[in-house]
Image (cartoon, grey):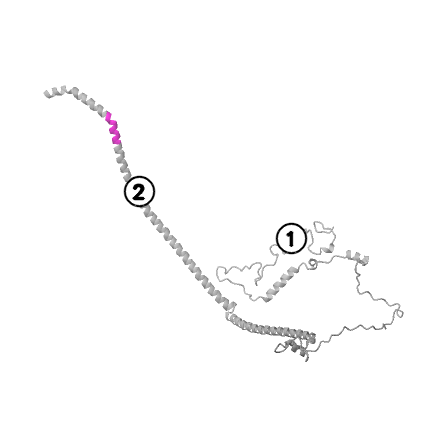
Amino acid sequence: MARLEKLYKQVNNIKEQYFIRNRIAEENRQKENEAAVRIQSWFRGCQVRAYLSHLHKNATLIQKIWRGLTARALFSQRVKTAYFIMKMNFYNKMAVKIQQRWRGYYVRKNVHNYYARKRYLERLTRKNEHIRRDLEEFAELQRRERERIILEKEEKEKNIQAERLHFLLSTKQCPGVFNSPFRAEPDEMELRLRKVKLLLVRSAPKERKTPNIAPDLTNLMPNRERLPPIHKKPQGPFRPALEVQQQRQRPLESSLRVTTSITALEEAREELKRQEWRTRIIDQTFLPFSNTRRNKQYEGLMHTSTPFEQMAYGTKHFREEHKEYLKGKKPFKTVFTTCNVFDKFGRLYSNAGNIV
């Protein structure tokens, strides 16, 4: 009972303490709440960051493994491609070598005989050497002949000069110009003067006056026609007016284009074809070595001169070849003729090519 009575005495104090503590608690509740929230956010941030770090590590590992796998697969594919290209290049190179060997063998055996060609070249070389030696000998002979002619010409000129200077020859009493007493032996011209003879100068022949003994035939033949003059065309402004008028109104002379045939080009081409046909060597058509073109006909070029003749000129692109297609159609209207233009010189032409 005493304790209960003591407790009743302390009721007000307890209430006061309760209210005080409750007020203190209310005052600190916001701070404690903020502190608790901060603690929770830090903890949760640490937890989430640790989880994200774990996920990042696992994702990096997965990406590393996947990228390595794809890179190894791509590299393997590239290696296979490079190996295939290298192998195909090697096969192509070997095929080219085989084709070279086969074509060389085929040409040497069936088209051009290598050993015959070699023998021909050897014979040609020997022949060239022989001809070259002959030409050199001939050139040497020509050079000697030219030298001989030059020496003879010089000798002749010296002889002529000596004949002209013969008056300078030495005598027993007086030595000449070319025989000086101060020389051990006479000059060459002195010896030449002794050999040649004196050149005699002849005067020009005089014209002799002969009496005119030709008879006068004018009285004997009075009706004789006189000969025409040597120059039929008079010189200067003395030509007759009729001849001048004829010269002015003379007809035109035909040019080369008019006198030449209009089919001269085609005839020349046909003659050239006939000459090529006579002089050609290979008559066999070229068969390719591959089997891909076995059933395909050889198509020669349009402007080549081969044994495979091209199609006739104008078969595809000109109307004159297939005249059956032109029945019932209007012909072309020409404005000007192609040849014989000057036969109708001075006349006019219409748009249809008819003479007005």
**Residue 203 drawn in magenta:** no
- Which badge, 1 or 2, comes first in the chain's sequence? 2
Disc 1 on helix, strand or loop? Answer: helix
Residue 232 relative to residue 302: left or right: right
Is residue 249 at least partly visible in the picture? Answer: no
Residue 200 relative to residue 221: left or right: left
Rendered position, 184 above or below 268: below
Q: Which residues are magenta?
A: 27-37
The disc labelled 1 sits on which kind of residue? Leu
Image quarter of residue 24: top left
The quadrant the N terminus occupies is top left
The disc labelled 2 sits on which kind of residue? His
Residue pictured at 62% horizontal, 63% vertical: 272
Magenta stretch secondary structure, dominant: helix
Rendered position, 279 above or below 156: above
User: Any mark on residue 326, and which?
Assistant: 1
* Viewer-closest of 146 and 349: 146
Image quarter of residue 175: bottom right
Residue pictured at 45% horizontal, 61% vertical: 95
Disc 2 on helix, strand or loop? Answer: helix
**Mark 2: few/some/many CA within 10 Å (<14, 14-19, 20+):** few
- The residue wearing badge 2 is 56
